[in-house]
Amino acid sequence: MAGMIPDLHDEFDWDGDFPPRIPQKDLVIYEMHVRGFTKHASSEVEHPGTYIGMIEKLAYLKALGINAIELMPSHEFNELEYHAYNPMMSDYKMNFWGYSTINFFSPMIRYASAGNKNCGKEAIKEFKSLVREAHKLGMEVLMDVVFNHTAEGNEMGPTISFRGFDNHVYYMIAPKGEFYNYSGCGNTFNCNHPVVRRFIIDCLRYWVTEMHVDGFRFDLASIMTRASSLWDKVNVFGRSDELVNDTVTTGTPLNEPPLIDMISNDPVLRGVKLIAEAWDCGGLYQVGSFPHWGVWSEWNGQFRDMVRLFIKGTEGTAGIFAQCLCGSPHLYQEGGRKPWHSINFITAHDGFTLADLVSYNQKHNVANGEDNNDGDNHNNSWNCGEEGEVVSIPVQRLRQRQLRNFFVALMVSQGVPMITMGDEYGHTKGGNNNTYCHDNFINYFRWDMKRADPNGFHRFASLMMNFRSGTECLRLGDFLTGDRLEWHGIFPNTPDWTESSKFVAFTLVDQQKRELYIAFNASHLPVMVTLPDRVGAKWYPLVDTSKPTPYDFLVDDVPNIDVVLAQTSNFLNSNLYPMISYSSIVLVLKDEDAF
């Protein structure tokens, strides 16, 4: 079923629903898959793999520290696009991720507990229920939307809808009928054609007004900045400027693309979150330069790459890592944007999970049945000395430190952190960095593993997220200045920005917590850090990724906390702190009499 047509008289009880309107600087985004979140038997929900099943687990996300859920594609899509027997898994390949839209106005029917009951219209009610219940808990719902291509493939693909209406309107077409393929999926939606952009605006308005969603993440959004087929000023603007050549080559990046202009200034869409994946498969990379009208934020791919490189100890990355901690002003400040226009992430649905990022040097995609030829070969990962999951105890300990180091870097950075479903407990996909075709345990959230938490990483991740939400200086509305921020090295006020530096430390003034000291040692050697002196106050150890759980994050209920503090008191009384290799710390300034 390509979609359902609701009755004009259908009613839904929104129960006074009102969008949370959370300031973007305060967001903590959780990228998730509707089916994968509760499909595993260990979820123990009544309707696994559905919108209703998700509702049962919203309280978990709230307690974790999440206030915005980003749903991977939930428009009606073609699950059977890759359907074929996969002998490597003894099952059938499916389009699990959903980036193959059939109907842009319909929620995915197979994510509804009612299935196609009542011609699929129950799916609308279940999706609305999910949004309503999320709002009641103060969480926003963002949708990952795919307007760069459709499920109709290339010029040889199936005819489902747009191809039957008018190829030359809805797709970028070459003179002889070939399809431009900036999406890497066979076709490219002709986004800046007047008819197509009206369609996209109507679709976005529908999901905001009728379904109450709070924002959108646009897959391969750079395609929406490319010139449409048959580009000319009359076609696009209804008039021609005689002083300017009115012909632009199809696919040329535009400085002021009409579609982005319309979305940015639409009265219905004003105030919703707009997030661009600012690149495409045609080589257009616009991180830091996406046309934004002051309202668009971006998946910061440079944050992902530079944090991965620095944390694993790559030389020459300390300076750019420090920029990323500050909200990437080198990318966003000059264009008039703010730190919160940077969506910071280390992993996403495609690529390694966080656990696999510290466990594998190479992709292991054999399970996809493509002889390990699919997926990205450039992952900036490090297996910490041994490949795979069965490794020596020293490697296991190093991996646990690295997991925490990544999470600390993400949570103390200015901007908006985004974590991927399952990373908070260390979900592994066995080194597979392209799990698009697996509707099975590889992609399912493992609630049993989350509950077991043998290494305490879930505890640590939750504490870090909630610490960020309660710390004003980590969620600033503007870029840091010298009255808040001081850089340090192994000694106070002596940062090392040389090519060989693998140590970055800084202090941040906070309105409630007075001041934080945060340091990262990405070297294979330990260091003794001299802390900045603060008269009448002393540094309190909060986070140390080198410590075993629960001493990696000190809270009041930690067993024998007095003994733990006594072990560090001699160092702290002398304004010193020992850091082992590959570790990070967060210290909080407190009055001396508070100890």
Image (spheres, rainbow, N blue to C red):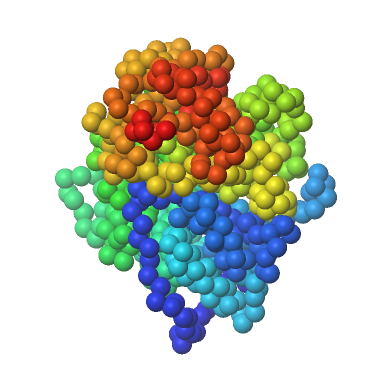
Horizontal side of residue 333 vs 390, given as left or right: left
Q: Can residue 276 be seen in this view?
A: no
Frontmost residue, 253 versus 408:
408
Horizontal side of residue 127 vs 41, given as left or right: left
Residue 108 lies, in percent from the top left, at: 58, 66
- Residue ID at (51%, 27%): 566
Q: Residue furthest front?
A: 593
Q: In this view, does 458 lie above or below 560?
A: below
- Residue ID at (50%, 72%): 128
Q: Quadrant of residue 342?
A: top left
Q: Residue furthest left?
A: 243
Residue 31 lies, in percent from the top left, at: 53, 51
Q: Total label count?
A: 0
Frontmost residue, 40 versus 331:
40
Q: Residue furthest bottom?
A: 9
Q: Is residue 143 visible?
A: yes
- Residue ID at (62%, 32%): 548
Q: Is residue 393 above or below residue 333?
A: above
Frontmost residue, 194 versus 574:
574
Residue 329 lies, in percent from the top left, at: 31, 33
* Quadrant of the drawing holding the N terminus: bottom right
- Residue ID at (41%, 48%): 469
* Quadrant of the drawing holding the C terminus: top left
Frontmost residue, 370 versus 28:
28
Horizontal side of residue 552 vs 589, given as left or right: right
Residue 203 lies, in percent from the top left, at: 42, 66
Q: In which quarter of the image is residue 317?
A: top left
Q: Is residue 324 above or below residue 441?
A: above
